[in-house]
Image: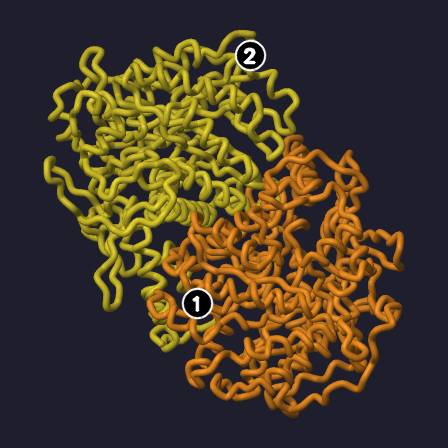
Chain colours: A yellow, B orange
Amino acid sequence: MNKTIPTITTGALPASQKIYVHGQTHDLRVPLREISVTGEAPLRVYDSSGPYTDPAAHIEISEGLPDVRGGWLQGRGDVEQYAGRVVTDADNGFATGARLTPVFPQHRDPLRAVGTRAVTQLAYAKAGVITPEMEFVAIRENEGRMEAYTRDGDPMGAELPDLVTAEFVRQEIAEGRAIIPANINHRELEPMIIGRNFKVKINANIGNSAVTSSMEKEVEKMVWAIRWGADTVMDLSTGRNIHNIRDWIIRNAPVPIGTVPLYQALEKVDGIAEDLTWEVFRDTLIEQAEQGVDYFTIHAGVRLHMIPMTAKRVTGIVSRGGSIMAKWCLHHHRESFLYEHFEEICDICRRYDVSFSLGDGLRPGSIADANDEAQFAELRTLGELTKIAWAKDCQVMIEGPGHVPMHKIKANMDEQLKHCHEAPFYTLGPLTTDIAPGYDHITSAIGAAMIGWFGTAMLCYVTPKEHLGLPDRDDVKTGVITYKLAAHAADLAKGHPGAQLRDDALSRARFEFRWEDQFNLGLDPDTAREMHDETMPKEAHKVA
Amino acid sequence: MNKTIPTITTGALPASQKIYVHGQTHDLRVPLREISVTGEAPLRVYDSSGPYTDPAAHIEISEGLPDVRGGWLQGRGDVEQYAGRVVTDADNGFATGARLTPVFPQHRDPLRAVGTRAVTQLAYAKAGVITPEMEFVAIRENEGRMEAYTRDGDPMGAELPDLVTAEFVRQEIAEGRAIIPANINHRELEPMIIGRNFKVKINANIGNSAVTSSMEKEVEKMVWAIRWGADTVMDLSTGRNIHNIRDWIIRNAPVPIGTVPLYQALEKVDGIAEDLTWEVFRDTLIEQAEQGVDYFTIHAGVRLHMIPMTAKRVTGIVSRGGSIMAKWCLHHHRESFLYEHFEEICDICRRYDVSFSLGDGLRPGSIADANDEAQFAELRTLGELTKIAWAKDCQVMIEGPGHVPMHKIKANMDEQLKHCHEAPFYTLGPLTTDIAPGYDHITSAIGAAMIGWFGTAMLCYVTPKEHLGLPDRDDVKTGVITYKLAAHAADLAKGHPGAQLRDDALSRARFEFRWEDQFNLGLDPDTAREMHDETMPKEAHKVA
């Protein structure tokens, strides 16, 4: 085992301090970041970075983050602690001895719903209950603003309130227009909301592979991604130690963690798609739900009869989950077990409040395949599944493409709204051209900003290494910053109240040559400062 | 003087060869790049890189590029060679001795129109003449295609022909909807066209400053920018040696060179805006026209009565030309001499066929100032000036902003089309948020792709160093590639015939794991290959 312990990045961002706003109804404190500005009031901004940027916090990854939600969960009186499923060697890809990532040292038995109750935010919202999670995200969305600001934007059908109230949050969740991914076994979570009438969010992907894996490295990847603004993190690990590493990640994650359970299920059957069974998959769902995964990508929309629709495509099926399921369906010539067992999947998810991210297994992998029959057939199925999940009180978002030229982006949003009943849309890019490998964070940021404006609630980042290799630390940061600016451009265009405050503060600093303020108010103060100093290094130039 | 001679970058791009298509009517050969693809016909793409990527070309910057247009100009019989203006010490910022950049060694007396004739492409187009320049760009726009391809796009009012003919080019120029910037003293030029019904083009800025200057460095910057796809280059030099360096650039430039003559005029009055006079400016126009500058940015739209409109802005006047003229107008409390002498400026431009790029001196410098009264008042004035220039048979394009949130971009295009009578639009970005210094190539690529789709004919690049410092070689490349992908995304969305051929070829390569083809078909093969090799270095992985 590698004994060198990588550093977990901690410390405040430049000129920034962590502040906490307390709840009015519930016992909670919402983190915000306050940026100092010369001669002006400090600017409060949304802060997804967790305790890592709070100098007062004690960070020790073997202890995990503090329990934020335990009291809230107890207060609801509808969960029970139980022994939980026994971890098997298969869960860690049969890694043993020195090759086995150590078990996370602090064991805690999992929680589940009492009996057949739904312990989801959707169930509470429908019942008229405002949970602490709802109050938390309401305060968070306002970024500390107590008043409305001038609105300027075209919301494209979104209905953005001047100030977000906890009751507004409850209504949006009850209507299925927003979700708070918050597994009851992820007590370390600082809740956040994903919905068209809230700030546009971004997701960053991490994951070990068969080649490289250490729990410290994976925790640091997550910490690094949220430091720069990732709102959720998907752990797309494959290979060995997948169970234990996931424990380390979740215990140290203040943001929702998403996974694709199919990837681990496939590891359990030695990578042979045809050998997948409902039983193996079901067991994996429970395994991950007990660990605290907040949302599952489930490719239940890939149905047998749709697969021939991809035959004439330039790039066939490019989604990993989609191609695994297509292979299974064709081999057995049977309907997908994910589709057939979807209600049972819901029964598991409602017990832990794992949200659905209904996967787009037939998303286009090229400009040529955008908006085709296969893609939209699957989308309509995802709409059907949404209704089933809602009937089970499960929270749902819908995944979207992919590769789409600009003139076909709006149709993606329109079709999604129409067929998926306004469940939040969560898109990868889309990439607006295929001809720039090495720059796909940019080809996709164009599409992401546009579809975010049109109503997509969360944007899955793309790094410069997309299609080429595994992103390193710099690539992750570049991807996150690129998507933060795209999401913010969308917020500005939608006319989110207060969104322009940061642009204005930075522009004033720029006009007055307050260089330090200009750096500090930007998304990446370090890079801006370095670039400036390369050609104008003198301190004098920064205050001129 | 620095005696180390920087290398001028030459040689073909990977897997590429230069081919030439000959004219049917005129004696001309149009360069294209042919990319080899495994198992497929080679792909022909537009090539702005000039002889530098032709291994058969002899490159010696002290000799300049071959004379492409001399025969064409002679053939028209409407120009005369004359001694030209005497170069003064002031033209080079009074640099002397070892600090003086050497005069370009090959002297050639300039050409001008005989008498008061207009020797512009617009004059010929109106007269029904198809010039060699027009035939050249027609062949170039088709990229070697001889047949129409399936169309898929939303042209947003543009009227794109299946195949571009020389007659179509003539009509578009005659109507003022397109320009071929082609000073009769720039004989080395490979003509290109800027217009809404042609491929979207990009411009890269270069320029020495008071601090650094060497002719080889500036020539190399230009060569480097066009290697990666810049269609025109603006030389924004200030400081010493400005005249001599410009000669070196133009004599070695296969692309149109644009300038802001006001910058040099200001140098001639020691940087004191108030001391500018029409006479100094007029003399500078003739100086640069004789050298072969293809288009002039002229900030004649900044009028005295508009300046108070900027008082309440967050970022006032951010255009350098705009602020110079505003200072002059306020000091003298007089109408701008550029506005008052605009007809005389036209008389100079028509004599050499220098195109106008009517500058947006009041462009917004922040999201807060987008689409305001000052900006649109100036735009309407640019529309008036367009009519005056056209009456003088001068070619015109219109510069646009700047910083604009997504929901206000379309209005910029609509207003420009309405008030500027469909003269080509040439925009900087626009940047869609102000909060990402260090990433403004991306904040602006979002706006650039969108406005390109809506009808902007040329996009002025923005590098990562925007607002922070002077771009280096890597920044220039990043800026050019970013804008090439934005322009291409716009072409795809407009449905340019043939635009998708490259995306499709690359996507097929990607789907079949033909790594080398995937790299070679991309905009930046070197970076894609490097990124791939970082994590998957084995040759075997490239053919798997």
- Per the model, the C-alpha gap separating discs 1 and 2 is 57 Å
Q: Residue visible at 77% across and 70% down? A: B119
Q: Is residue A455 left or right of residue B47?
A: left
Image position, residue B319 (x, y; %): 48, 69
Q: Is residue A210 left or right of residue A259?
A: right
Residue contact at pointers 1 and 2, CB within 8 angstroms: no
Front-most of residues A393 and B281? B281
Q: Position of residue B505 (x, y in %)?
A: 69, 37
Can you say whether B47 is above or below B398 in the image? above
* Location of mark 2 (residue): A305
Left/right of residue B185 with respect to residue B378 in the rendered view: right
Q: Chain under label 1?
A: A
Q: Residue B407's mark?
A: none
Report helix, strand or loop for mark 2: helix
What residue is shown with label 1?
A532
**Given the image, on which type of amino acid does mark 2 rest?**
His
Subunit bearing disc 2: A
Residue A142 in which image quadrant: top left
Circle 1 packing at 10 Å, graded few (<14), some (14-19), many (20+), is: many
Is residue B334 at all visible to an observer of this figure? yes
* Residue appearing at x 69%, y 76% in the figure: B347
**Where residue A354 appears, x then y in whole percent?**
30, 24
Element under disc 1: helix
Which quarter of the image is occupied by the N terminus of chain B? bottom right
